[in-house]
Amino acid sequence: MAKIINGDNVATFKRPFKFKENLNEIIAKNVIKYRKLAGITQEQLAVDIGTSHEYQRRYESTLGQEGIALIKLYRISVVLNVSIDKFFEE
């Protein structure tokens, strides 16, 4: 059911979507996988995407517990020559 406010329909119910609860872990595992397939070290990837080696080491070792900025994931996808959607696959 939707309410009409100022001529706009406003949804008033929650639709049933299924969100991946472990998305950060999935992305981190894929970063590790594609980095290793490319034969690139954590240090080199960090240099290529403009971050510190410590950040990259911590991100991978915690399996993305802190998450990752979209711009960093985009840069990783460019450096590793992997389509960004591949990082979301289980």
Image (tube, rainbow, N blue to C red):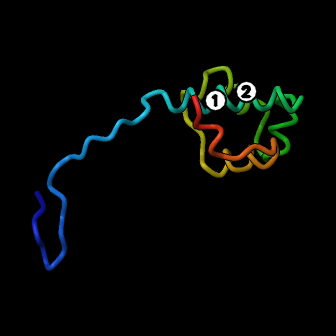
* Residue 73 horizontal/vertical position (percent): 66, 44
25 and 17: which is toward the camera: 17
Name the element at disc 2.
helix
* Residue 78 horizontal/vertical position (percent): 78, 49
Which three-letter amino acid code belongs to the residue tagged 2?
Answer: Ile
Q: Residues within 10 Å of mark 2 (few under 14, many from 20)?
A: some
Residue for point 71% across, 46% down = 83
> Which residue does the numbered mark 2 point to in the structure image?
32
Q: Are marks 2 and 1 in contact (CB under 8 Å)?
A: yes
Q: Quadrant of residue 34?
A: top right
Residue for point 54% across, 32% down = 24
Residue for point 65% across, 52% down = 71
Which three-letter amino acid code belongs to the residue tagged 1?
Answer: Ala
* Residue 90 horizontal/vertical position (percent): 57, 28
Residue 42, above or below 76: above
> Which residue does the numbered mark 1 point to in the structure image?
28
Q: Quadrant of residue 2?
A: bottom left
